[in-house]
Amino acid sequence: MSNLWTISEDSFDPSGLRHQETIFTLGNGYLSTRGALEEGYPGDHRATFMHGVFDAAPIIFTELANAPDWLPLTIHLNGDRFSMDTGTVESFHRALDLRTGVVTRTVRWRSPSDLRATLTFERFASLANEHLLLLRCTVTPDFSGTVEFRAGLNGNMDNEGLAHWRWRGQGRRDDVAYLRNQTRQSGIELVSAMSLRGSAGRDLWDVENAPTWVARVEAMPGQTVTAEKIVAIYTSRDADPAALVDKAVNVVNQCAGWSSAHQANASAWADEWARTDVVIEGDDEAQLAIRFNLFQMLIAAPRHDDRVNIGAKTLSGFGYRGHAFWDTDIFMLPLFTYTLPHIAKNLLNYRYHTLPAARAKAKAKGFAGAQFAWESADTGEEVTPTWVPHFADKTKLVRIWTGDIEIHISADIAYAAHQYWRLTRDDAWFIEKGAELILDTAKFWAVRAEWNADTGCYEYNDVIGPDEYHDHVDNNAFTNRMAQWNLQTALDTLDWLQTHAPAKAEALSDKLQLDAQTLTHWRDVIEKMYLPVASDGLIEQFEGYFQRKDIDLAALEPRAVSAQAYFGIEGCNETQILKQPDVLMMQYLLRDHYSDEAVRVNYAYYAPRTDHTYGSSLGPSIMAIMACEVGRPDDAYEHFIRAARADLRDVRGNARDGIHAASAAGTWQSVVFGFGGLRVTPEGWTAHPRLPHHWKRLAFKFFHRGKLQEVDLRPDA
Amino acid sequence: MSNLWTISEDSFDPSGLRHQETIFTLGNGYLSTRGALEEGYPGDHRATFMHGVFDAAPIIFTELANAPDWLPLTIHLNGDRFSMDTGTVESFHRALDLRTGVVTRTVRWRSPSDLRATLTFERFASLANEHLLLLRCTVTPDFSGTVEFRAGLNGNMDNEGLAHWRWRGQGRRDDVAYLRNQTRQSGIELVSAMSLRGSAGRDLWDVENAPTWVARVEAMPGQTVTAEKIVAIYTSRDADPAALVDKAVNVVNQCAGWSSAHQANASAWADEWARTDVVIEGDDEAQLAIRFNLFQMLIAAPRHDDRVNIGAKTLSGFGYRGHAFWDTDIFMLPLFTYTLPHIAKNLLNYRYHTLPAARAKAKAKGFAGAQFAWESADTGEEVTPTWVPHFADKTKLVRIWTGDIEIHISADIAYAAHQYWRLTRDDAWFIEKGAELILDTAKFWAVRAEWNADTGCYEYNDVIGPDEYHDHVDNNAFTNRMAQWNLQTALDTLDWLQTHAPAKAEALSDKLQLDAQTLTHWRDVIEKMYLPVASDGLIEQFEGYFQRKDIDLAALEPRAVSAQAYFGIEGCNETQILKQPDVLMMQYLLRDHYSDEAVRVNYAYYAPRTDHTYGSSLGPSIMAIMACEVGRPDDAYEHFIRAARADLRDVRGNARDGIHAASAAGTWQSVVFGFGGLRVTPEGWTAHPRLPHHWKRLAFKFFHRGKLQEVDLRPDA
């Protein structure tokens, strides 16, 4: 069954270089490194991204700075530099072992001078010590001659052209060379340290910003020579800047070598998989894909840092620049809340720590309370680009409105906080941090609500819902309903606090100015929220949506572009085609509030009008669940497998920019809440399996109020 | 008199680092290298800019790519790395020899380990072979021990954060290491090659993108050791990409060493100064400053390339990104036209080669003929940024209008072409290229003119004149008058061609569709151009200018910011304060068309309303001439010396961004046309000196119809 834990390929396709770099990303929750080749390849996008290591950038405000490169290792066979774009690659195999996070590449190569050798490169970022990175290379030549290893650290990195690092010095302590860099704007210091161990003596080429160990071995035909490159990285986010060199050098010196480090790493991974693994029998593709998607979340999840979040593309690519969206709170959090709640807490604490920025944003817009940024980075300030250059005409600019009016994220964060509490019953955290998230977002919603005297309703006008094909809409159902939920949950939270932590209730009421008049207003907004429902239960996505052009999406197939690209931004806005179905999302999040019939009616209307293939990558995993809910298992599987394949098969053509994190984490929700039918209620939990017809077994685990639950499901028999 | 050829300093002031880097820029018309230190200094802006080596950049469209660095040379004294920011600098002297373009730095240094040595660094870019760059270092230690030289090429360069280069390979041919890079967007290949010669054996540290020669010498106290770094650079703009390595390596190998290369360089410089030097006696500051300013123009002037222009900051800094403006045609061209006409021809040919882009611009705007770009780079396409981020609020953008409506540049280019021809009588060039520049810009002006039936005049509305404190104005006097001149000169050109090159006249008439109807229209536009003049000769800068607020500028002194910063962009627009005086500029360019009295009237009105100190750096040199014209020598000197000091004393506080090229070249015009009173007429030339009272002598040379003229003036006696 080893192949169900391994992503592998047997040929090297340069046309898919950047996609494969994303797929072979490794990491440990502290950093991730794309699967670029150690020796480099023309046009590669080699990158290591580290949580919280942001630096200023034009237009996008800030981005994760591509860190100094720890990968460089070039092999010279009697002077011929090994590379995949010279000589002849006679065989190639690359594998990512999901169980341990090790990437292995084996190449049989004939050099331009007709020397043959077999080269194997292995690497991992230790999950046992997040500062430790290992790289091992073995070379078995067919010839007698010199094998030279050149192992470097390279501070000359950039983000697709934008250089974020300055050189700040370098040095050597016995067998360890180190390099010191600093981000140009944010001033974060980073020290990387490196040793090269193996069967030969070595020299240091002490070139500025690229210190390089060089080791030469006289090799015999068939005799394998090995080099181990041991790297450690620390930043001034982790420790006192003056201590960084000591710390990094110590980690390298204390590493006994590949074998012991690999053992510790494998052991740490085994612990993670013991909680998170999902077993699917009867569908090898689904089995491998769910593990791949879980792996991507596990390497992106901050384990020891609660001041960082997970970007929409994890740490695996340049897409969205490391910025976090509601993707974390709604799509990723459930996985962690259910299986690794300490990680969920870190991610929610990040939101808590960014409350000052959320309050500043609300205030700047003339509101009150906490309005969270649509795109968020180190401080939580809004980092959605305001304008971006027009794709076709660089003298023109396109206004991006999401940072201004896609306001639902504040309710999404409150929802995630509440869900974490509901599942874990981590009252201490809820009292200390969670309650404030819920109360201060509610405060925002109450102030942001607009009273319409004509209808006698509160409204949210000029917003964007999750469905971004339609912007500047009034009374988006998802936004209005989630705002109402947030306000009601805030009132419930205050009640609960008054019973269980009365001092905190009083302190928060003071701090957030939650006087009687305010709470009365909240109740009024809840009661009079504009939330029309047709007699059959159909909910209009936003005011006037049903008057938009009704297009038969199916008639446009086969279609290789999004509906937005097909009709144009404005053209698409005029139709009923959805990037993702807001009403179904709302019913998913607040499932207990809707009857099965109400779900069926809305599914029947919105599913055919949704651009599942090229709309939002967030949609399919949730669609899979809702299809299960309405008893359409074949549809459910189609949506699920589309999400599961998003990156592995690059179904949207942009996996080169990084992993679709919401989709990856969403597949876990599809399996657990959709096919597994897991429901947690105040009384406990139940699972009502509705497995795809070809699945023989579905097994997963989750924590419920601190205890690991095991669920093992077979087809209805 | 050596000090009148030398810019020097005796102390190192890190707070003026970037200003001094600009001042100690060297070059040879192919490239320039800022005066950064060989070994680096924190916060330095080390840069080498090469004509035509542009690469795409956001917002500004394209910029000169900071080339791979040829300077790196670090010295290690028994392991202590020499740098100005460690140990103790016991003495320091730096000098730029304007006669030969050699920069020398001598430092007496005590290392952190208390080792003392005297180090001297010398460098130049050969004017005899523009691909050849020399660097020599001598070290005289007070101690016995190892002196190590590390000489590198560094491809890891960026433009203030934007990386333009990719690594494309490197190698070694005997004692020459080479590095191959390529710009990321424009695909220009560049090969740099390097040897390190001296008293020791050497190793190559073959680190990627930073090959480094290392030589170690065991030195004795008082014994001087020397290393010579010889570098050559070629790009794919110069030669077949496949031949670049051969060419660069050959240049290094054929260089016999510092002494012979220096001799050839000095000889080439002597030839240049023999034509261009200006002698001023009685005013050492003015003497040194005019030579410095001439030097800056000589190192920026392309000698073997007519597809490039000189940017507003020459090749000496990041300001204006290498883009060329009217600064070249109106402020720099006269120096070259009069003293080095082959360079003037190269610069005018650049405009000729960019006619396709100018025609495309006119067409895209709904006009015809040639509308030249306000900012121009490799192709002549408009590269003025359309929007730039707001200084104070990065979510906002500021619209830049100059690229849309500062249209006078098309007439300025025609003027420069005509002036070159008038002075050189280079009929062959005029027939082949110059005439077309004049005719096609005239075509633009005729189509761009708007008929006003109410006034019976042709107008140019919604423009920006040279005075950029006022934008979106109607009927700017400079624009209208220069357009009229351009049209009339085009008619004269066509007449002349019909006599002297009738085939060309016919070919151009066909190509540009200059039929009888068109020419009749041109005459109509010329005759009915809106050009009001008051009875006393006063000309209103633009329609409604006299109604703007009349501010007493003198009453704002002392003032350390521009009037625009003082009043705000909109506030300044509402006043009569000028960034530079358009009417005086117009009278300067078309001097024969205005009576002395008309000049006096306009000078009296506009001079006190011009922001001489912090307005345009283009203004003072022309103001100096006009002050001479109206018999105000003291005012003239004040304007002249302000221009002469612009960079040397950093009077505007932004010399760190590069040399103010228009100001530097303008000082030559101040001296020759202002104080020297040179006038060239169809009959010959005359000089009517009106020297500053303390000047004892003014001597200069210029070519008149191919013959070198010598002018030697003394005070009126």
Image (spheres, coloured by chain):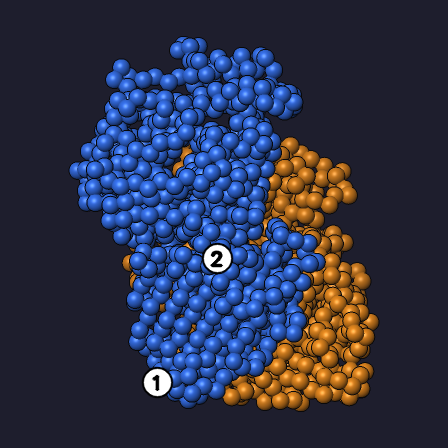
Chain colours: A blue, B orange
Q: Residue drawn at (62%, 47%), measured in percent from left and top?
A: B580
Which quarter of the image is occupied by the C terminus of chain A?
top left
Does B162 sit left or right of B619 as displayed? left
Q: Which residue is mark 1?
A: A114
User: Which quadrant of the structure image shows residue B270?
Assistant: bottom right
Q: Relative to residue A586, is residue A282 drawn left or right?
A: left
Q: Label 2's element?
A: helix
Vertical placement of residue A336 versus B344, above or below? above
Q: Is residue B366 above or below residue A678?
A: below
| Amino acid at the residue labelled 2 | Ser
Q: In which quadrant will I find the N terminus of chain A?
A: bottom left
User: Where residue A369 appears, x then y in whole percent?
Assistant: 57, 26
Is residue A654 or residue A263 the one in the foreground? A263
Residue closest to the eye, B64 or B599: B64
Mark 2 lies on residue: A267
Q: Can see residue B52? A: no
Q: Dot 2, how many residues are within 10 Å of its Cα: few (below 14), some (14-19), or many (20+)? A: some
Q: Secondary structure at mark 1?
A: loop
Q: Nearer the viewer, residue A111 or A287?
A: A287
Cα–Cα span, label 1 and label 2: 42 Å
Q: Position of residue B400 (x, y in %)?
A: 51, 44
Dot 1, crowdedness within 10 Å: few (<14), some or many (≥20)?
few
* Residue lying furthest left: A555
Q: Residue at x 74, y 66 (%)?
A: B85
Residue A274 in percent (x, y) is at 43, 49
Vertical order, A223 against A583 (above or below): below
Task: Check if mark 1 and mark 2 are on a common chain.
Answer: yes
Q: Chain of mark 1?
A: A
Q: Residue at x 70, y 49 (%)?
A: B613
On the image, which quarter does residue B36 sit in?
bottom right
